[in-house]
Structures are given as structure tokens and as C-alpha cells.
Image (cartoon, helix red, strand yellow):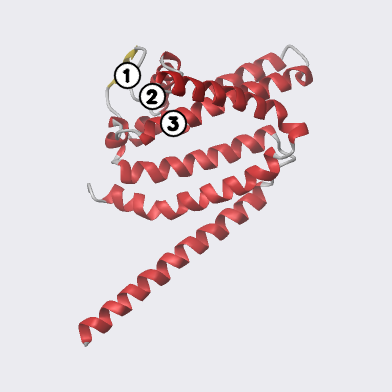
Amino acid sequence: MKILKPVIGIVLAPAALAAAWATFAALGPVLGTVRVTFPLLAGALVFTLAHLGSAFYRGKGGGGRLYVSAHELTHALAAIFTGVRVHKISVRSRSGYVLMDSTNAFISLAPYFIPFYTLAAAAAYWLACRFYPAAPLRPWFLAAAGFTLAFHLLHTADILAGPVQSDLKKAGGAVFSMPLLLLLNCLGLAAALKLMFPELLSLKAYAARLLAALGAAYSHIYYAAAYLVNTAKIYISS
């Protein structure tokens, strides 16, 4: 059974790359409409500059306890969602842990594809709109969404670019986890953009682009594999 998840990861890798291509192809037209998306872009730019500045002066991106808190709380919420009992949450400036009865791939990987603070901002915006007009609040929500999405994506990239995390090992290893996380983050980003700007992103067009990329990726792999097999047969029979 240990070999199953790495095999799944290898099979998922082309799908993850296709999703990345489809998502970035969709990002251009959506984010290029600056008159609509300016607050989102401004929020993302503010955090990106702050993160890069912190990395330049301190040798590491900013976030510290804020990131660790979101990371461990997401583990805990994923555990509760799947019916696993949580006993303790510990948060320090650079590390933390959640003590729970058991774990699974969803619990282990949840912080790497669920943007905790973006969901919190969305919940706060939804709640505020119950009591106040939505129009004046929307630019502030979009700015917060851009800031927190950049927070999630940049910190996730920083963590995954370093030594293999114990979370990934628990989930089934890096070969399984990395393609899955790329796929889930791309699909999640596309879903977030659709929810924020429904008129700018067509899910039908996005799905068509994704399926076309998937078909192209797997067909190239199939023909390459067939070529190698046929070549091997020729050498063996000769």
C-alpha cells in the first residue's frame, strides 16, 4: 500500500501542471481588468512587497506567529470537520503542533491549500453585509482577500520550497502531496476569482481549457511511453 500514493502522485502530476496552465491563462484577462480588480491587486501587492522586504532584511519572509496560528488552526478545524478529536493546539513564533487522536491526508495537507485568513475575511464580510450596505464594504473586502491570498500562497511556496515537511510525509510523501497541492491551490484560486468576480471568469471556459490541457498532457505521455516500449521491443528482438 505504501507504493499506492506515490503512484497516484505521479499520475496526478500532469493534471496539476495542466491546472496550473489553465489557471494562469485565466488569471490574465481577469486580473487585467484593473478598474474592477484594483482593490484585490492592491492588497496582494502590499503583502508581497512586505514579504519580500522582510525576506531581504531578515533572510526569511514575514508572518511568524500569524502564519503558524493559521496553519495549526486549519489542522484543528480539518480534524474537527472529519470527526477527529482535538486535544491541544500549541503555537509558537516559528513552530506549533496540534495534538489529536489521529490524522489523515486531508488533515495533514489542509493548511497548504485552504487560505484560513481569506475565509475569515469572507466570513467577516458576509456578516457585515447582514447589517450594512455591501457596496461600500466590497473594496475593503477585496483588498483583504488579495492581502490574505498572497499571504497564503507566498507562505505555502516558502514552506514547500524548503525541507520536506512532516505534514507531507504523514499525508503520503512529497511525490503524492506536491502535485495534489498544486492542483488544489489552482482550483481553489479559480473558484475564489469566480466568487469575487463572477462576470469576469467563465467556469465553462476554464473547464474547457483545463480539459484540453489535460488531454494534451496525457496524450503526450501516452505516445512517449508507446514510443519507448516499441523501441525497447525492437532492441530486444534484434
In percent of width and height, residue 79 lies at: 37, 25
Q: Earlier in the sequence, mark 3 or mark 2?
A: 2
The residue that appears at 67% across and 21% down in the rendered structure is 141
Q: Measured from the top left, where is residue 98 in percent x and y? A: 32, 19
Q: Quadrant of residue 77?
A: top left
Label 2 near label 1: C-beta < 8 Å?
Answer: yes
In the image, what residue type sits under mark 1? Val
Specify the amino acid type for callout 2.
His
Q: Distance of mark 3 from mark 2, alpha carbons?
A: 14 Å
Assess disc 1: are there few (<14), some (14-19) or many (≥20) residues with their C-alpha within 10 Å of its C-alpha: some
Residue found at the far front of this picture: 57
Number of marks present in the image shown: 3
Q: Amino acid at mark 3?
A: Thr
Q: Earlier in the sequence, mark 1 or mark 2?
A: 2
Circle number at residue 156:
3
Q: First in sequence, mark 3 or 1: give its number.
A: 1
Quadrant assignment, res 189: top right
The residue under the point 63% across, 50% down is 206
Observer-nearest of 155 and 205: 155
Q: Secondary structure at mark 1?
A: strand
> What residue is drawn where x is 56% and y is 24%?
49
Badge 2 is on which residue?
75
Looking at the image, residue 155 lies above or below residue 198: above
User: In the figure, residue 130 lies in which quadrant?
Assistant: top right
- Which mark is drawn over residue 69? none
Q: Specify the label residue 98 is tagged with.
A: 1
- From the image, state whether disc 3 or disc 2 is nearer to you: 3
